[in-house]
Image (spheres, grey):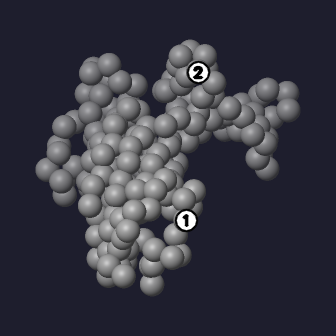
Amino acid sequence: MVKISDLEVGQVLKNEFEGITRDLLKQYAKASGDTNPIHTNDVVAERAGLKGVIGHGLLSFGFISKLFEDFLEHGKYGKMIDIKVQMRGMVRCGDLLITEATVNKIEGKRVHFDVVQTTVTSVDIKDKDGKVLKQFEAGERGYISEKDIERGLVKTKEVPEGTLTYRERIATPGEAIIELFE
């Protein structure tokens, strides 16, 4: 059961999804009716100035609303009042999509959240000598730009296979309000 007394400012709701694939984008295109080929066809996406297909904005948004619907157990404990987001970054195949909502204010039965959806895009894994052991789609297609590097979005971390290079950026910031029934 979700109660106001169980929540506090600074508390974080979080979801991670690592299944952004071309097959998922094709299924979503069919189900949603958004058949714009920049979401399903690399050739068309490249002609449009992209380096490959990109996820549908509303698919990404769906993970935000899902976070709250799961938290509220699909209307059992409360309802969504408002969600406002800015879609700033593209979601690509292979991305890890992290959705976080942080409680910033509680007023009566209403809970206000800051929402941040982040993409983590793996580029490659290198050994200690700098030899590429594994290259991901982002590395193959050149998804990482000089601008990403200048902004400090490209990072490395040690993984069992070697050193992983990845980009981590905010794709969708926003805010949301829910109201609990208690």
Residue assigned mark 2: 151
In the rendered image, residue 91, in percent from the top left (x then y), is placed at 41, 40
Can you tell which mark lies on residue 8?
1
> Where is 97 relative to 139, above or below?
below
Can you tell which mark lies on residue 163?
none
Mark 2, secondary structure of its residue:
loop
Disc 1 crowd, CA 10 A, few/some/many (<14, 14-19, 20+): some
- Can residue 101 be seen in this snapshot? no
Residue under the image location 49 percent in, 53 percent down: 104
Residue under the image location 53 percent in, 75 percent down: 6
> Where is 103 relative to 36, above or below?
below
In the rendered image, residue 8, in percent from the top left (x then y), is placed at 55, 65
**Alpha carbon separation for disc pair 2 and 1:** 33 Å
Residue under the image location 60 percent in, 16 percent down: 150
Residue positioned most to the right: 128
- Give the left or right position of residue 143, taking residue 84 as reference: right
Quadrant (top left/top right/bottom left/bottom right) for the N terminus: bottom left
- Can residue 28 be seen in this snapshot? yes
In the rendered image, residue 7, in percent from the top left (x then y), is placed at 52, 69
Front residue (pair 15, 42): 15
Amino acid tagged 1:
Glu
> Where is 12 relative to 20, above or below?
below
Residue under the image location 49 percent in, 37 percent down: 170
Q: Nearer the viewer, mark 2 or mark 1?
A: 1
